[in-house]
Image (cartoon, rainbow, N blue to C red):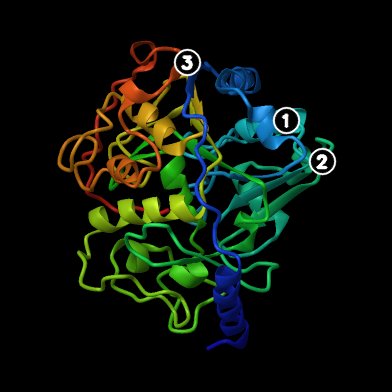
Amino acid sequence: MNRRVMISLTTARMLSELCPPKLKRSVNDRVALVSCSDYGQFEQQLGTALDSIGDVKKLVHGKTVAVKVNLAGDPRVWPSAVPGGEVFRTNPQSVRATISLLVKAGARRIRILESFFPASQEHSLWARYHLRTDQIHHKGVPIIWENIQNLGNHKHYVRRKPCNPLVYPAYHLSPALFQCDVYVSMAKLKQHWLAGVTMSMKNNFGITPCSLYGGDCGRDGNEQPRKERADVLHNGIIPVPAGVDAELDPNSPRDPGFRVPRIVVDLLQVRPIDLAIVDGVDTLSGGEGPWIPGIQQVHPGIIIVGRNAVNTDAVGTAVLGYDPLSERGEPPFVRSDNTLRLADEALLGTCDVRKIDLVGLTLDDARTKIRIGQGEGRRMVT
């Protein structure tokens, strides 16, 4: 095993035993649903949503806030050629607006996190997604951009155990995810070919570093990964490297529709989301990206915000025209178990919108009927 990876994994295990995760605390379960016709209005409307759910200033004031964006897809295959960014990715204007509001609320440091290829910390790589680090470093507080695809500038991974693990007993993740007081998942409102829907919880799937969970991780780990997570996490056909916790039951189904929702719930336990922001201004119908045949651009014109990620995603699922309580085989969960139901069963939130304190627009006002994707073609796993 590579000495650096070996030391990192050994240290990660020691740190997890010395510093166990904090117990999950109850949070405000209110969800705000507001209109937003274009990204020029994003800061104003997101501010309205944050005010509606309350206690956000108390949440971030004087704190380090980490924001996990969703840059879905590999620009080596699908370059970001659209000037404003493609609708299936986090919009650069929405990032600027969110940072501005966090700073106004008193945040003392911002960390922008995502995992992408190549696994490098070069600031210029973010510009491929029209995220200009030089344009955002004027907000008056330190802003740190970090690619969490591997160790990066850190010396060791952090090992965290879910309270009630479903697939792996522990996960080895970038320390950047825990070097913050507040963790924000900034996601898109989208359907997903496999998981049915993808919002704040599914965005958390991308915190697993491909250096340890990618298809070319190998026996010793690979700090320069080039393959996505499908063979390890989705399909379970490649084991994790030595020193990384192996799955609980190697005889469990190798079905991605079984594994992915449960890993998402595991990750929500090990890196809880303190604030969920779901961008539904512009998005896609029929899948999560242009690699899904038959997708179409749509304009729901909304933003969904909540302190509880499960509740927030349940509202988003209802806005898309689906029942968040649906069983597997029912739209939109035609290929997988319902992640929302699994998270509900784990007591992480509720997927019953009747139990959610919804403020702002009503579901009838915001609901957009979007068909499920029919494509069976090539898919990019993110």
Q: Which residue: 34% across, 71% down?
A: 247
Q: Name the element at disc 3.
A: strand
**Mark 3 Cα within 10 Å, few/some/many (few <14, many 20+)?**
some
The residues tagged by marks 1 and 2 sit, at their Cα atoms, a distance apart of: 10 Å
Work out whether residue 108 can be spotted: yes
**Mark 1 Cα within 10 Å, few/some/many (few <14, many 20+)?**
some
Q: Which residue: 48% across, 61% down?
A: 208
Give, as a three-letter code, the residue at label 1: Ser
In front: mark 3 or mark 2?
Answer: 3
Where residue 185 appears, as percent x and y from the top left, is: 53, 41
Front-most of residues 380 and 338: 338
The residues tagged by marks 3 and 1 sit, at their Cα atoms, a distance apart of: 23 Å
Give, as a three-letter code, the residue at label 3: Val
Disc assigned to residue 141: 2
Give, as a three-letter code, the residue at label 2: Val
Disc assigned to residue 359: 3
Q: Which residue: 43% across, 63% down?
A: 228
Q: Are marks 3 and 1 in contact (CB under 8 Å)?
A: no
User: Is 133 on the left-hand or right-hand side of 192?
Assistant: right
User: Is 375 on the left-hand or right-hand side of 180?
Assistant: left
**Mark 2 Cα within 10 Å, few/some/many (few <14, many 20+)?**
some
Q: Earlier in the sequence, mark 3 or mark 1?
A: 1
The residues tagged by marks 3 and 2 sit, at their Cα atoms, a distance apart of: 31 Å
In front: mark 3 or mark 1?
Answer: 3
Q: Earlier in the sequence, mark 3 or mark 2?
A: 2
Disc assigned to residue 100: 1
Where residue 340 appears, as percent x and y from the top left, is: 32, 40
Q: Which residue: 69% across, 51% down?
A: 145
User: Is 191 on the left-hand or right-hand side of 204?
Assistant: left
